[in-house]
Image: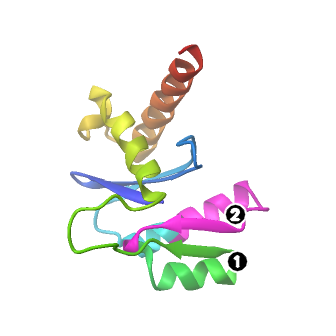
Amino acid sequence: MVGKKIKGRKRTIAVDTMGNLHGISVDEANIHDVHLGCKMIQQMKTKFPNIKNFLADAGYRGTAVKYAESLGCTLHISKKIKDEFAIQPTRWVVERTFSWLNNYRRLSKDYEITAKSASNFIKIAMIRLTINHLNS
């Protein structure tokens, strides 16, 4: 789980190890990442009750880790490897998915009026990406 900040909104997505979208939340930008992480963990546990592990960046430490434990799963926080730029293991999958999504003009800025329509356009873009990956 990683959040992508767009002016006025935060996009939080949950992907598998291949970058396939499993959960999305588009919320106001003034909500802290920890609360959005808890919301995403709850959404994923409802959708996939057998899930046991989540990976997230340092923005989700603290309350989200305790919340995940209360639901019977583990939230692993990726740690900073060095003080310089370095690719963080497993986190790059989410960042790659955000990169794929940002190639769509409609998702590059916040053009949508409602969070629901923004969420739906992300789902449409992921459907198109999945079909393109199947065809190649």
Compared across the picture, whether 10 is left or right of 51 comes to: left
The amino acid type of the residue labelled 1 equals Leu
CA separation in Å, label 2 and label 1: 8 Å
Vertical order, 28 against 121 (above or below): below
Instruction: Tell me which residue sits at (50%, 32%) in the image.
Output: 126
**In the rendering, at what x and y percent does residue 41 appear?**
59, 66
Compared across the picture, whether 46 is left or right of 29 comes to right
The magenta span reads 38-59
**Residue that numbered label 2 is attached to:** 45
- The one of 130 and 136 positioned closer to us in this rendering: 136
Between 89 and 9, the one nearer to me in the picture: 89
Numbered disc 2: secondary structure: helix
Residue denoted by label 1 = 71
| Mark 1 neighbour class, 10 Å CA radius: few under 14, some 14 to 19, many 20 or more | few
Residue 49, position in %: x, y? 77, 61
Image check: 58 left or right of 22? left
Residue drawn at (53%, 65%) of the image: 55
Q: Is residue 111 visible?
A: no
Q: Position of residue 9 (x, y in %)?
A: 30, 54
Residue at 54%, 74% in the rendered image: 76
Identify which residue, 42 or 114, lies in the foreground. Answer: 42
Q: Which mark is residue 38?
A: none
Q: Earlier in the sequence, mark 2 or mark 1?
A: 2
What colour-coding does the image apply? rainbow
The amino acid type of the residue labelled 2 equals Lys
Secondary-structure class at tag 1: loop
CB under 8 Å between discs 2 and 1: yes
Residue 40: image location, x then y, percent: 55, 62
Q: Is residue 103 magenta?
A: no
Q: Quadrant of residue 43?
A: bottom right
